[in-house]
Amino acid sequence: MPISPSSHTSAQGFAPEGRRPRVTIARGATPWFVPTLATAAVTTALTRRSGKWALAAVPACALSAGMLWFFRDPEREIGAGRVISPADGVVQSIDEWPDGRTRVAIFMSPLNVHVNRAPLAGNVTSVEHIAGGFVPAFNKDSDRNERVVWHFDTELGDIEMVQIAGAVARRIVPYMDAGTKVEQGERVGLIRFGSRVDTYLPAGVEVGVTVGQKTTAGVTRLDRD
């Protein structure tokens, strides 16, 4: 598959029907990916002068390949449903909230795609960064971790989505600001190296996934009729 840097103009990421999905490098990955790739290129070139440089070139090339995998950003054929998953991962918990909403928490491992997508079409009404800790995302105390809280004005009313950093993921990169119109399944941000994404379904919307179920961002339906 060809790999190229993704751009804001192609943020929706819909896979053309009948074509093989194109894989890009996620926006926000440059501070990690470029230095690693440069180190691999330099050390590989230096092996021509001395084989000793292979001791540095081999792990640098391996790390570069890992970065390509970690920061891959495949185009997706957007799934059907009123609310679709914003993240690749596994449903960690489903919790009823006192206000009638239901929180669906999706755990993202370092092997998952780290780009998150809009669960519904609408308008971004707020994007709030909240400072916090960095405990593992599967820990119950991760609710107090570093996070970005999104609110979308949609046909179902206000939808809240929370990107939560974990022990490894220490940076969340929003792709949009408040006031932006967003399509369902459009790329909205990146959590470097995984963590967790919570989606709050409005009162009256039934959950269509189960704990332990794998999800695909932009594809898996979170609600049911």
Image (spheres, rainbow, N blue to C red):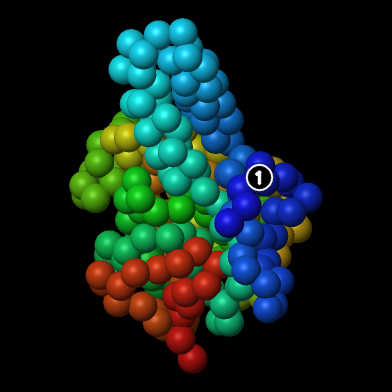
In this rendering, position of residue 62 left or right of residue 151? left
Residue in view at x 46 percent, y 86 percent: 224
Residue extending furthest toward the top: 49
Vertical placement of residue 175 versus 35, above or below: below
At numbered mark 1, what does the secondary structure look like: helix, strand or loop?
Answer: strand
Whole-percent x, y for residue 181 in the image: 75, 58
Vertical placement of residue 209 versus 30, above or below: below
Look at mark 1 in the image and give the residue it sits on: 4
Residue placed most toward the observer, 68 or 135 = 68
Q: Quadrant of the N terminus?
A: bottom right
Q: Is residue 214 visible?
A: yes
Q: Quadrant of residue 192?
A: top left
Residue in view at x 29 percent, y 35 percent: 167
Vertical placement of residue 92 versus 68, above or below: below
Residue in view at x 58 percent, y 36 percent: 28
In this rendering, position of residue 195 left or right of residue 85? left
Vertical placement of residue 140 versus 165, above or below: below
Whole-percent x, y for residue 63 in the image: 39, 31
The amino acid beneath tag 1 is Ser
In this rendering, position of residue 129 left or right of residue 16? left
Q: Is residue 143 visible?
A: no
Whole-percent x, y for residue 91 in the image: 32, 66
